[in-house]
Image: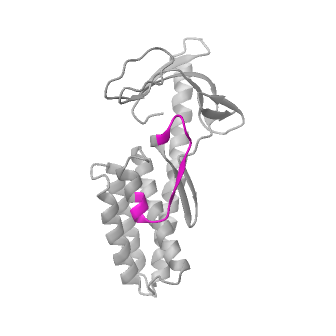
């Protein structure tokens, strides 16, 4: 395990890119560039040098059923802090305050935040046994979560898909509050699995293409990324 500008990189990790950050990231005039950089408003430009295929072991989302921890991206790159999310309200604030960023991550945090809340309610024996009541509870929570970032396409799309899954589960023969809850939690968890798989595939194909087509025979390629692409 090596550390590159605060990022831990392991040669045996199984995903995407080992990168040396040497660019700039400034907020309100504070610069993280190795070269001199005068402050302005917000500059989120990063400059990477791809050297080998590997991965950064920093996880934006840590989840197991009933527990969700998210990386507070406002603390990067100097500090690695994880915030516990126990409810839809916690997820709403994490998204609204931009502690979690990136369109797919926003949707996943919202979906899993509600999943954790449902599991905690069930664990306290406070979950309604009536399928329609749990369906209505989830519907209200999803609508609330969408208001945390109304312009986030992935978030609204995930909410619509999850609502349909819950509606179908509630209409099933002998449906119960628990069966509706389980259908929601399983669907939210699958979204995380699919998102991680998609992102790894994008990174692997993209890195391979860049090294083959842009390197010109060299073993290093410089890439400038903006916003949340890193």
Q: Is 102 located above or below residue 53 in the figure?
A: below
The one nearer the camera, 8 or 170, is 8
Relative to 15, is 153 above or below?
below
Give the residue drawn at x 50%, y 67%.
116
Residue placed most toward the observer, 126 or 196: 126
Say which quadrant the N terminus sits in: top right
Q: How many marks?
A: 0
Colouring method of the image: one colour
Residue visible at 30% across and 65% down? Answer: 143
93 left or right, relative to 1: left
Is residue 159 toward the left or the right of residue 20 in the image? left
| Residue 7 % position (x, y) | 60, 33
User: Percent from the top left, x then y, of residue 117?
Assistant: 47, 69
Q: Horizontal and vertical percent for residue 57?
A: 62, 40
Image: magenta residue range: 75-91
Residue 25 colored in magenta in the image: no
Note whether residue 182 is visible: no
């Amino acid at each position: 395990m090596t550390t590159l500008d605060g990022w831990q990189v392991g040669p045996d990790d199984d995903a995407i890119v080992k990168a040396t950050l040497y660019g700039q990231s400034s907020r309100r005039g504070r610069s993280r560039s190795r070269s001199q950089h005068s402050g302005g408003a917000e500059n989120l430009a990063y400059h990477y040098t791809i050297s080998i295929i590997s991965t950064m072991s920093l996880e934006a989302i840590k989840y197991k059923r009933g527990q969700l921890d998210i990386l507070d991206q406002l603390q990067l790159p100097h500090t690695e802090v994880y915030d516990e999310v126990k409810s839809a309200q916690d997820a709403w604030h994490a998204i609204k305050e931009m502690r979690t960023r990136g369109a797919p991550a926003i949707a996943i945090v919202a979906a899993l935040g509600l999943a954790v809340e449902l599991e905690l309610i069930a664990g306290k024996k406070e979950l309604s046994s009536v399928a329609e009541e749990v369906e209505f509870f989830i519907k209200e929570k999803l609508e609330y979560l969408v208001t945390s970032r109304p312009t986030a396409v992935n978030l609204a799309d995930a909410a619509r898909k999850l609502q349909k899954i819950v509606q179908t589960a509630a209409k099933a023969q002998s449906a119960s509050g628990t069966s509706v809850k389980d259908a929601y939690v399983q669907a939210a968890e699958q979204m995380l699995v699919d998102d991680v798989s998609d992102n790894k595939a994008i990174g692997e194909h993209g890195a391979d293409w860049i090294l083959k087509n842009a390197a010109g025979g060299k073993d290093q390629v410089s890439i400038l990324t903006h916003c949340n692409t890193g």
